[in-house]
Image (cartoon, coloured by chain):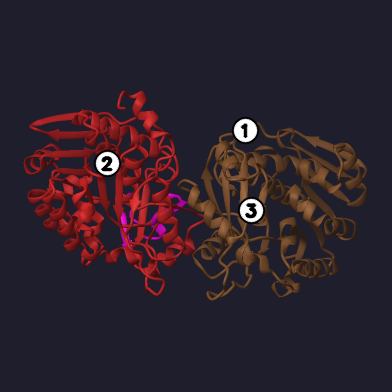
Chain colours: A red, B brown
């Protein structure tokens, strides 16, 4: 048995959550429902304009890995924070969830700070993200422990992390070490605009290395530059062994071994959509490494996504194992 | 018209909220339902043991003042943070609520950090607080702007702040400046154990300077060292012009001009009791300075307390002015 069921690599962020209305988004040039990268100055400007906020650990792959761990999965995470107060909060929350997290912090003299994401939550529960990457941008191959990657049944690569100068090399190192030891590679496309920025690199990774692709409808359409969702799903399924594609209130689609399943979304009142896709992936990977069939993995994913949508913040709060047990997914 | 309806002075803190069960409190020597002071080492030890948490601005008087401002009151706050990430969060959240907040931050080279309070929330919604004061302990007379105090209809003094070496002198300066300009003084007893630490100083302040005393039942009993609640209320009412005493699920009592009123609590499912007393005081002071009768001030207080009890965190989330308007307290 390998030491870890899943090892995630991504942007280590603290979320700054604030409610706002749609007019605020328009007035401040924030595009609704997506992730936009900001520099420090824009982050400071936006922060000065938002109302009272709350701070809670986030980061897409980190949310996913927290979900795996909360379900009892053996999980580790790789992502860079600084040795500052927000970095300490991020590290605490991940470790407190039972995640192995050993990435070396950037020192106190680093110019940048721990990354943060201003998450603007509109009354419809949709979230619009404004990300100052800070030190998390500078993840390098030196941060990848090949022995740890070799101990992973699956690695989970966050598409967002393709934005960093040395992160493609870091991912390549992780993939080689994992695959060399018989492990498998999963990738999330993260965001439709992230796909635009890195389509060619994503395509190479999907065709050459990935065993499982996570995405949502918008990312899938962006990836294959089409408006035909079914055609895009079919193209993805031809390139990678397993595809798990979420579709908001329509649930999720799984394609594997020439088959396709659809699982409906969990009926829930949307409070804050932050983390829905992340927790879908976390529960899916947990179920997959626990030996469940693809359709059941998607059911687990939809259940976990439904939990995180029902409250503020992107990390699970309810007893996820009990939730799974009630659905026969122990 | 004075510039400020209320100026609060207290401990500037960021709350670290984490759920836990009663066994965790017992295992870690945390006394339930009260505030305990910790040093940095104990804070670090406790933080390492708690699960994933969320960070949100707190501080008793700061919560009160945030409530005054959210209700449309003109409000200012005095309390010390450091120029660090948590200090920036505290300052942002208060100013974003419309509060005037100009206390000079402790510099980056200060030994201590911005104060924080680990708030352990048990399933019954009760909160047990573990406070590392950090730089907020070092509030001095130099931090009190006499011109600002003279511009206050009311100042609101946090009993917790009696724990600092120079804070008695700071309070004396604030009281003199406020009263000298015709303003009034309110005091909250904060916590029964805080009362034990400072009973004599509190008594002097109540008799000699206070125009309005806020407390809860336990603090009132501790203040007058008796088990007879009615007797304690009567003694307080003989010493100070107005007494507003909360009584958990029994609501609140107000004594003024030889009369006594009881207002029932707002029926609500308790999620997190943090901030209930603070918001009671905030809405009470807002209503009082808006010209409402004592009984109606207590009604406003119970309504605001009910709002903050119903969600995580000690700052109001709902539209408090709308809540008041529906109760005829515009």
Closer-to-camera residue (A48/B8): B8
Residue A274 in picture, x, y percent from top left? 37, 46
Quick one: label 1, few (<14), some, or many (20+) residues within 10 Å? Answer: some
Residue A245 in picture, x, y percent from top left? 21, 39
Q: Quadrant of the C terminus of chain A?
A: top left
Q: Which mark is residue A226?
A: none
For this view, does B78 lie left or right of residue A206? right
Q: Which residue is mark 2?
A: A281
Q: Which residue is mark 3?
A: B63
Q: Quadrant of the N terminus of chain A?
A: top left
Residue B249, image quadrant: top right
Label 1 SS: loop
- Is label 3 on the same chain as label 2? no
Q: Earlier in the sequence, mark 3 or mark 1?
A: 3
Residue A187 in picture, x, y percent from top left? 19, 48
Q: Is residue B205 above or below residue B296?
A: below
Q: Chain of mark 3?
A: B
Q: Is residue B288 above or below residue B88?
A: above
Q: Is residue A23 magenta?
A: yes
Viewer-nearest of discs 2 and 1: 2
Residue B280, image quadrant: top right
Viewer-nearest of discs 3 and 2: 2
Closer-to-camera residue (B45/B165): B45
Which residues fall within the magenta stretch? A14-38
Q: CA distance from mark 3 to mark 1?
A: 20 Å
Q: Which residue is mark 1?
A: B268
Q: Is residue A84 magenta?
A: no
Q: CA distance from mark 3 to mark 2?
A: 38 Å
Q: CA distance from mark 2 to mark 1?
A: 36 Å
Q: Is residue A121 at all visible to an observer of this figure?
A: no
Q: Chain of mark 1?
A: B
Residue in view at x 58 percent, y 56 percent: B42
């Amino acid at each position: 048995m390998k030491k870890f069921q899943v090892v995630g690599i991504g942007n280590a962020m603290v979320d700054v959550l604030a409610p706002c209305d749609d007019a605020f988004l328009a007035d401040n040039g924030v595009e609704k429902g997506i992730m936009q990268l900001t520099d420090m100055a824009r982050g400071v400007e936006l922060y000065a304009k938002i109302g009272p906020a709350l701070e809670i650990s986030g980061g897409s792959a980190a949310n996913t890995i927290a979900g795996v761990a909360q379900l009892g999965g053996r999980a580790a995470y790789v992502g860079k924070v600084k040795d500052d107060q927000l970095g300490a909060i991020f590290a605490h929350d991940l470790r407190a969830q039972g995640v192995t997290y050993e990435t070396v912090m950037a020192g106190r003299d680093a110019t940048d700070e721990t990354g943060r994401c201003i998450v603007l939550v509109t009354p419809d529960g949709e979230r619009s993200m404004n990300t100052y990457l800070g030190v998390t941008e500078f993840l390098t191959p030196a941060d990848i422990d090949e022995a740890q990657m070799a101990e992973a049944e699956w690695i989970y690569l966050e598409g967002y992390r393709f934005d960093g100068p040395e992160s493609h090399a870091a991912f390549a190192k992780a993939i080689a070490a994992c695959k060399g030891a018989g492990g498998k590679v999963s990738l999330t496309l993260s965001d439709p605009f992230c796909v635009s920025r890195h389509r060619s690199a994503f395509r190479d990774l999907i065709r050459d290395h990935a065993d499982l692709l996570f995405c949502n409808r918008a990312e899938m359409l962006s990836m294959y530059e089409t408006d035909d969702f079914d055609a895009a799903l079919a193209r993805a399924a031809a390139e990678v062994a397993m595809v798990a594609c979420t579709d908001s209130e329509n649930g999720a689609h799984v394609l594997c071994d020439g088959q396709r399943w659809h699982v409906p979304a969990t009926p829930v009142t949307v409070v804050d959509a932050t983390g829905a896709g992340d927790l879908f992936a976390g529960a899916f990977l947990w179920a997959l490494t626990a030996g469940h069939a693809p359709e059941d993995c998607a059911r687990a994913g939809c259940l976990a996504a439904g939990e995180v949508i029902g409250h503020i913040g992107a990390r699970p709060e309810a007893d996820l194992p009990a939730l799974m047990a009630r659905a026969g997914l122990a």
